[in-house]
Amino acid sequence: MFQNLQDKLDKAIHNLKGRGKITEINVAETVKEIRRALVDADVSYKVAKEITADIKEKAIGQDVLTTVNPGQLMTKIVHDELVKLMGSEQVGINISENPSTILIAGLQGSGKTTFSGKLANFLKKKKSKNPLLVACDVYRPAAIDQLKVLGEQIGVPVYTEIENKNPVEIANNALEYANQNKHNVVIIDTAGRLAIDETMMKEIRNVHQSIKPTETLFVVDSMTGQDAVNTAKAFNDVLDYNGVVLTKLDGDTRGGAALTVKTVVNKPIKFISTGEKMEALDVFYPSRMADRILGMGDVVSFVERAQEQFDEEESRKLQKKIAKNQFGFDDFLKQIKQIKKMGSMKDLMGMIPGVGKAIKDIDIPDDAFKNIEAIIHSMTPEERKKPEIINHSRKKRIASGSGQKVEDVNQLLKQFNQMGKMMKMMQTPQGKQMMQSMMGGKM
C-alpha cells in the first residue's frame, strides 16, 4: 500500500539524517523532494505545494532535542501534515435510525458491489446489526448475481426484483420489506457507469431523493488516482454524499486519491478496502494511514483485525493448552484459518513496523500456507496431537502424502517447536511486558 510514495518520502527525509539542526538551507532540498514525491503519487501540484510550504514553515529553526535527530523531527512534521490533509479525525458511519438506509454510489468497476457485501459483513459482526442487501443495479445482471453470492457467503439476505427495471421502486419496496422483516440496516447497491453521464446522475439522484438515505457513500477506485478525486467531486455536486470509500488499496495505487479527496470534496474518508475477502475492510483513521505511508506500520489495525477473528473463549482454551504443552497441529490449523480471514498476507505484514519495507519486492501469495496445510492434513490425528512421536518413517509417509520433501516436514516441525517455546514464553509476565512494549501499549 503506497509503497512508491513511502520509498520516496523516506529518501527525501533521509537527507536530514545526521544533521545537527534543521536550517533553511538543509531543509530546502528535503521539502523539494517531498513535493516531488507527492506529485508523483498523483497529488495535485497545488495541494502538494501547499502542504510542503506548511512543512517548511514548521521545520525551519526547530530546535532538535538531543534524543531526536532532524530526520525524526521532519518525519513527525510530515506525519502531522499528512494527518491534517486526510481529515485529522476518524468519522464513523451513521446508523442511528431504525432502519438506517445506506446508499452506495460510484462508477462501474469501482468495487461498489464487493464493498456492499463487506459493509454488510462489518455491520453484522462488529455492530450486531441485521442488514439487508438490495440489488438496485437493473442494467447488469452479473451485479445481482454477485450480490447474491456475497450475501450467501456472509449470511445476509439480498432483496431483488429481477423483472423490475425501476431502481426507485425497488429501493422503496426493499425498505418496506426491511420493516416487515426487522432488518435495521438497508444497504442499497446502485448501478454504475463507465463514465459520468446525465442519465446516471438523474437516476441516482431520483433514488436518493425518494428514499432519503441515512448515509450516502461514494466508492472510489484508488487505482485511478487523481481521476478518482475529479469523479468524487462531480458526484458530490449532485448527491452531497456523507463520505468516501477507497477501494483496491492493495493494488498498484500511487496514493494521491487517498491524500487529496478530503481536501477537494470536504467529505471524510470513512472506509478503506483491500482485496476480495469479506473481512478485508477497515475503518479509515487518518493518523494510522499516515503511519503506513511513512513506513511506521499500523499495529493497532493489525490487533483489531486479529481480535475480530479470535474468539475470547477459544483464546482462553488455547492459553491453557500452551501452558500445559498441549498445543498441537490441529490448534495450529485453527490459527492459520483465522489468520487467512484477516485479509491479504502482504497487507497484514505491511502493518508490522519495519516489515513493509523489508518485503516490498517479495511476492507473498494469499495461499502461502497451502504447503503447510497439506503437510498437516497428511498427518494422523495422533501425530497432530503429539508431534513428538513423528519419527523418520512417519516423516517420509507425511512428505509423500502431502507432495512435499522430508526436508519440508523437518522444517515445519522445527518451526512449530520454536513457535511453541515462544508462545509459552509470551504467557509469562516478562513476555507479556515485552509484547506490550513492542506494540506501544496497544494490547
Image (cartoon, rainbow, N blue to C red):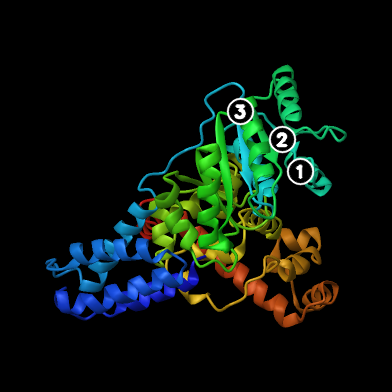
**Left or right relative to 365: residue 213:** left
Q: CA distance from mark 3 to mark 1?
A: 24 Å
- Label 1: few (<14), some or many (≥20) within 10 Å? many
User: What residue is drawn where x is 45% and y is 72%?
Assistant: 40
Q: Against 177, is 23 above or below?
A: below
Judging from the image, what secondary structure is the residue with disc 2 in?
A: strand
> Which of pointers 3 and 1 lies earlier in the amino acid sequence?
1
Location of residue 23 in the rendering, given as x and y in whole percent from the top left corner: 14, 74
Residue at position x 14%, y 70% from top?
66
Extreme residue toward the top, this view: 180
Q: Nearer the viewer, residue 205 or 302?
A: 205
SS of the residue under disc 3 = helix
Instruction: Give the residue at the far front of this rendering.
Output: 198
Q: Which residue is mark 1?
A: 147
Q: Are marks 2 and 3 in contact (CB under 8 Å)?
A: no
Mark 3 lies on residue: 209
Instruction: Say whether disc 2 or disc 3 marks the residue closer to the N-terminus.
Output: 2
Say what secondary structure mark 1 lies in: helix
Q: Is there CB contact under 8 Å for labels 1 and 2?
A: yes
Amino acid under disc 1: Leu
**Residue pointed to by mark 2:** 133
Residue sitting at x 71%, y 66%: 367
Tell me the CA gap for discs 1 and 2. Answer: 8 Å
